[in-house]
Amino acid sequence: MLKKDKDKLILEHYMVPEHIILSEEEKREIIEKFAGGNPYNLPYILATDPVVKELGAKPGDVLKIIRVSPTGYKSIYYRLVVRR
Amino acid sequence: MSMDKEVTKYAIERVKFGLLSPQIIRKMSVVEVTNPDTYDDDGVPITGGVMDKRFGAQEPRQTCPICNNTGMTCPGHFGHIELAEPIVHVLFAEDVYNTLRAVCHSCGRVKINEDKKEKFRKTAALYKKFRKDVYNLYVKTIISKAASVSTCPFCGAHNPKVVFEKPYSFFKVVDEEGTLEDMYPNEIREILERIPDEDLIFIGYDKDVVRPEWLIIEVLPVPPLTVRPSTQLESGIRSEDDLTHKLTDIVKINTRLRENKESGSPALIIRDDLNLLQWHISVYFNNDLPGVPAAAHRSGRRLRTLVQRLSGKEGRFRTNLIGKRVDFSARTVISPDSNLSINEVGVPVEVAKELTIQVRVTEHNIEEIKQYIINGPDIHPGANYIIRPDGRRIHLSFVQDRKALADTIAPGFIVERHLKDGDIVLFNRQPSLHRMSMMAHIVKVLPYRTFRLHLAVCPPYNADFDGDEMNLHALQNEEAIAEAKMLMLVDKQIITPRYGAPIIGFGKDTITSSYLLTSQETNLVKEEFYNFLSILDLDTLPKWLRSRYTGKNMFSLLLPPDFTYSLTAASEIEPEVIVKKGRLTKGVIDVASIGAEKADSILHRLVREYGNDFAGDFITKLSKILDRYLISTGFSIGAHDLKLPKKITTKIMSRIKRALNQVNGLIQKYERGELEATKGLTVEETLEREINNILSKARDKAGELALKALDKDNPLYIMTISGARGSSLNVAQLTALLGQQTVRGERISRGYGDRTLTHFKPGSKTAQARGFIVNNFFNGLSPTEFFFHSMAGREGLMDTAVRTQQSGYLYRRLVYSLDHLLVDHDYAVRTADGRVVQFKYGEDGVDPARSDHGKPVNVLRLVESISLLYPKGAAASTEYIDNKLQKIRNMVPESLVKELRDVLIKKKANRSVVREAIKQAVINYKTSTTDPGSAVGVVAAQSIGEPGTQMTLRTFHYAGVRERNVTIGLPRIMEIVDARKSPSTPTMTIYLTGRFAKKEELAEKVASKLIETRLRDVVTEATIDIVNRTIMFALNPEALREKDLEPEKILKMFTKKYSASLKDNYLIIKLANKSLEEIKKYRDRFLNRIVSGVKSIEHVTVEKEGNEWVIYTSGSNLKEVLKRPEVDHRRTVTNDIFQIYEVLGIEAARNAIIYELKKTLEEQGLDVDVRHLMLVADIMTRDGVIRQTGRYGIVSTKESVFSRAAFEITVPVLKNASLRGEEDRLKGVTENLIVGSRAPVGTGLVDVYMQIGERRGRKQ
């Protein structure tokens, strides 16, 4: 019988794009480039989001999301992990 | 405003909200109101009364005693009333309550332990600065936390529980029994005064602008008379404003209360007076308080007090601040004129003489202007006013000798001249649903009294000529004129941003005409041909023309000589339309080629490839030709065109007869009880469905026969086939039969008891008794048929009425949720206050209005047309193509690179073609990107809101064959953007793994195991044995087998917690020591236990999709279903967006929103660019949670107070803004509109600066 590793399931779903935790340096660069130095200007993702929990990201991290785009083939989105 | 005064212009930079302290109120007051009377016997305002002269001058000749201005310029001055007793401010009563709960009544500190306070303060400060929404929640939690503490952690005092009774009464609980004691405003005020400034941040006050005790009013400001002007009635009696009335009441009671207090009246009387004063003041603020009698006039009309003045559709915000009245506008009936260009508008001379444009006299135009002055106000290109350099205005109709006046004109004068040919004006038709509802036109002054417009511009305005009126606005400055001309002119708007295809194009008669003109056999007489040619202004005729004066050639002359294209026509006569090098060689030109709202038509290609100017010209010229041609050939329709040959009529009749017989047979079968139900349906439903099938098939067949029977030159046929007007259904209804009439999607069943009309037998289910119409419009309907037809017609009318309302509100919510979104200079979409929503607009930066049906480059078309230019050469190698593409990778989106590669390889392009195509693709992409400052949010809202009215309201739609039905159309769109917790019809699409997907039986088995089954579903009887304290469940073996359950399995579920056993098909559970009542409860609980399946999955159907079996369900539970091993967890989805959010996260939820919106719109046949849907989804999910497009969702996260207040819940928004000390920095659209300044959007985002003085950087 097929056995399912319950935890990894959602990351494999086609509706869930790839989420990557940015390094401190990349994070600073993105915040500078898009948010004018204020991380709260980025879009958010909750720390309780199933994908965040799966990745083990912490509040304050910035996630890079590689979206499959209907117009641009692939496009990049960033979200700041926040508590709420 | 007087012209002679120097006026300094200030721009409002920001607006700070806060409360007025009693000190400030007293300081700004110019009069203390103590006298309730208004005027004395001579009609002079009483000093110290509510109409005191010091409130400000009203009449133009009156001077203000305070500021010395006259009525025109005096701004009015505030007064005040000193209250005898403090009064609770009703609007803030709830906040007072929360504060009283959170704060110690004796020391005033917020009841949180000192050690926690520092941390809380830091977090609160952070949230207050960066996360306004979270700060509000945070305050709420702190308050509820502090409220639960009764002993103060600082002073140890015991705090009584406070009880708040809406709208303004406070009590405290004084003993254990819960005895209530009044808390008077005075006492409350003292408590609030004790709260230290540094604790205010915990309970939501901004210490810089608010003190909590200010929420208890001790001095009431009295607004100036400009706010509450009195009006003189015709009879000469003065009538006072509602506010004045209320103020006199307040003064009256206040005086009485003071006198009673001073004379030492009994406490009871004082309390009554206090309550009365509280009521008057509360009603003065808001005359619509729940549980409070409203103040009314003697006539019974309710007073319109402060809150009513501001809020709602008729309130200050929505009627005066968002919607402003304008000068320089005109409105009249519209009529068509195909002699105009599409860019023109015909303006009646009467209008032109009234609307003026200011022109400054210069050396270059002085002669021209002199003539205007001589012509004066009554002769057309004249002028109405002259403004001399000293600012004096001269009305020309009062000037005797205009010729003499004209001679005194010199540069520097300003003349208000009439509107004349060539001026740019804005033209608009309401409802203004999208930006093409207001376009710039070039004036053409014409006789008669209607506005004239070209027929091809009717679609964007949604105009017809059955009495429609339109508005026209004359632009008043060069900047506006230039912008309108460059951006808003009709031909710039041919392509709509909704789907990137022409919205301006041909329709109705012009289509008929072009169909006739370009059909095979049309040959024109030479004279006629040359007559048409005169419209085209051609210098030479192409060689290919020779003397073949066909309609096709006529059309070809309009096309660019290098234009090559092919498409499929709408009509079947010559389905293939081929244009080769500017010649229409094959095919008929119908809607598919030149129709409005058609993508990939000839018209579309022309706009894209030859520019808007060319396309505009093409439309103008072609419509002139088509109009003239239709006039010369003639086209009409009469009753005889609807008559079918006898032979066909008999055929149709017999077909209908057969269907009716079939239906009767079915009904008889049903009545005998022999009809078998389809799975998931009742017998009645099965019968209805079968009957519907038979009857609709019959009508389709009859319609088909009818259409086929029509001659090829029958006007009905021509119009239908060319797409000019009407569908094959219309033809069928006119000539064959109307068919089934429906109400709520079903055969008509309501009426007198169990029949629809008394003409039928009770309970009759026959076709005719249930609204099937066998007659057609030509023959006429029978009385019963006519009645049924009217029923269906009435439903249609109701539907439209409801739909317009619903979609209007949806649209408004969308606009207010998106209007602050702009493309920034880096092509990211940000809110007005700088929060990122998209990192690149639409993920590729392309403006749908500049796209080719959504794509920046039509790659296939590009490669094909370039291949024609470079025909020679072998196909380039894949490496060569990849190499070339590598260089543009960073310049264009990946999707374009991929498509280019695929097409170039497939089309076997040679090296020159590859190079040129890639170069052109980059250029095309760059020119199709948006501009910084584009109001993409509003455009997205328009693109979803505008088609809203076209959507069905019919909620249900049977997807597939069986019982699964889903919500569609407008209700579904609302469900999605409202972010409802669960959809009204949740469904799942479950994909299976491996062998389960391959075999139907296995899939069916998986499916049946998914259905939620409770114990009650597999039990025939549940009995309680009182003696033994047991419950016995009689299991139903058949039901168990169906669900693939064994009795042991069920037993296992109960053995863990209870002593349960099995005895020949009985499940016995022993519950010792339980009373009968308890056992009964247990029985119900056990019966509700889920023994198999997944919770909330109600129905399942297994269907084949491609080469696999897929399960569709009604009811959804993504979390549990994904856990099943047989289920493919990668592809299984639900239409419940919240479940997706909870299980798969915010990004998946965003994808789901886009997918669901897209699916719903497509189903309705509405074309909307994905970029608009993506923007909506992105703003809805921006904050990591799904926010609705409404007052509690996206709108509540807007920074601007004004913008929020203008949307809904005006007063609470303003109230909270003042408590929080919010600031409106006026960055968005709505707020700038409100304060009357230019919004930083589009061209308004750009300013020109001039550097004055030396440039130091240069010199060094």
Image (tube, coloured by chain):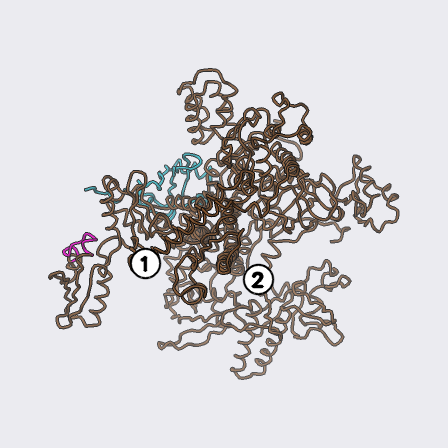
Chain colours: A cyan, B brown
Which residue is the site of mark 2? B20
Q: What residue type is labelled 1?
A: Tyr
Q: Mark 1 lies on which chain?
A: B
Residue B485: image location, x then y, percent: 65, 38
Which residue is the site of mark 1? B670
Q: Residue B194 carries which label?
A: none
Q: N-terminal of the two: label 1 or label 2?
A: 2
Is the C-beta separation of discs 1 and 2 under 8 Å? no
The answer to whether any part of residue B937 appears in the image is: no
Q: Distance between the residues labelled 1 and 2?
A: 78 Å
Between B221 and B795, which is closer to the camera in this rendering?
Answer: B795
Between B708 and B621, which is closer to the camera in this rendering?
Answer: B708
Residue B1047 magenta-highlighted: yes
Q: Quadrant of the N terminus of chain A?
A: top left
The answer to whether any part of residue B386 appears in the image is: yes
Q: Give the range drawn in magenta.
A: B1039-1050
Residue B479: image location, x then y, percent: 67, 40
The main secondary structure of the magenta stretch is: helix
Q: In which quarter of the view is residue B890 placed? A: top left
Residue B499 magenta-highlighted: no
